[in-house]
Image (cartoon, rainbow, N blue to C red):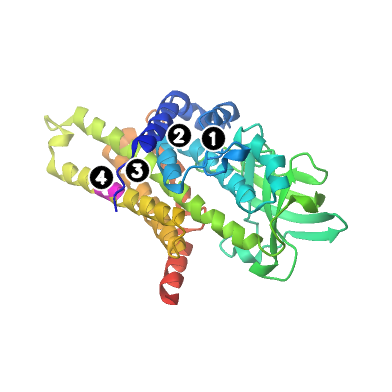
Amino acid sequence: MDFTLNDDQRAIQEAARAFAEAELAPHSARWDEEKHFPVDVIKKAAELGFAGIYVREDVGGSALKRLDAAIIFEELSRGDVSTAAFISIHNMASWMIDRFGSDALRQAYLPRLTSMELIASYCLTEPGSGSDAASLRTSARLEGDHYVVNGSKAFISGAGVSDVYVVMVRTGEFGPKGVSTLVVEKGWEGLSFGANERKMGWNSQPTAQVNFDNVRVPVKNRVGAEGDGFRFAMMGLDGGRLNIAACSLGGAGFALDTAKAYIGERKQFGRALKEFQALQFKIADMATELEAARLMVRNAADALDKGSPHATQLCAMAKRFATDAGFEVANQALQLHGGYGYLKDYPLERVVRDLRVHQILEGTNEIMRVITAREMLRQ
């Protein structure tokens, strides 16, 4: 299979790289230090079509493929991992509305989401249900032409700032078949937010609880049919996992390039560090791991684009491998900097902190192994 980029993909890659270099990289350290959510800069990404990457064109989307998205997020993450990851989450939420929502729901929200007049968050995880997502307890009781929603969601990126929340709720029996998806707007009575979590990384985006206290949501804001929400959420996560894997590739690729430059300049024992064979072997292994991870991500993206029956397994495998490899490469890049790598004057410690959470979110890497084994054994 040939993953050589075509002319359109090279143009997309160059646009994403230029945006990352001009709009993200110069501010990344400050955003991390000040815990600043750069909404103004994120909205500029919409001008390049990055707010509705695989949303249909009739509502302002770019109608690109998952492979294109992987290219975009790898490049954006070279500028700032945390901010690129939030753009991925916005895209996942928008895609769910586009793919499964009624035409009226699509027209009501997507033109403003693809332009980033509105920003979206994805709400699945709860305080009591993380990896066991199907056990979620946030309830939606039907009363006339509205659902009345009660419960809480945890670790929600963009919480309190985002305008739209794509929320998985329980409308029926316990388990995955009793879950539905609703679109909820900020400002509706009964919707509130917890304090911003104090995190190790991903500091350029807020993370907080989203609380529902008798929030009335119109039935017309349901995405698809009752009982299909868990399936929608899992399909959204297939693509979300690829995007997070691509973000790991970008952050780790930046870290590797930074380390390569450093060992070419730094001298010890009268020689440049790059002349020591042990360090040559180290950067060779780092580059090899990233190349293997990139091929896995692009292969999985291609499978998802083609509707392969193995797509879910390939996405889980790629997410597990790329996020593990990305963190390890960034950590080794920090090690190559010695004590300087541990200082906030250098970017490596920030990249390491940002990449660590990729092994946890969008399904932990342990759950990726569960998915992979399950899919293998059912074949």
* Label 1: which secondary element: loop
Instruction: Say what secondary structure mark 3 lies in.
Output: helix
Lower position in the chain sequence, tag 3 or tag 4: 4
Q: Residue at x 60, y 57 (%)?
A: 233
Instruction: Name the mark on residue 287.
Output: 4
**SS type, badge 4:** helix
Q: Earlier in the sequence, mark 2 or mark 3?
A: 2
Which three-letter amino acid code belongs to the residue tagged 1?
Ser
* Residue 279: percent from left, percent from top: 18, 42
Q: Which comes before the other along the chain, label 2 or label 4? A: 2
Q: Is residue 325 above or below residue 279?
A: below
Whether pointer 4 and pointer 1 mark residues with C-beta atoms closer than 8 Å, the reply is: no
Circle 2 is placed at which residue position? Answer: 80
What crowding class fits label 1: few (fewer than 14 Cα within 10 Å), some (14-19), or many (20 or more)? many
Task: For residue 149, say whether it is visible.
Answer: yes
Q: Are marks 2 and 3 in contact (CB under 8 Å)?
A: no
**Relative to 272, 63 lies left or right:** right
- Tag 2 and tag 1, C-beta contact below 8 Å: yes
Which span is picked out in magenta?
286-291
Sort mark 3 into few (<14), some (14-19) or many (20+) by Cα contacts within 10 Å. many
Q: Going 68% across and 63% down the picture, which residue do you hit?
A: 179
Check residue 371 for magenta coloring: no
Can you tell which mark lies on residue 330? 3
**Disc on the earlier residue, 4 or 1:** 1
Inter-mark Cα distance, 2 to 3: 14 Å
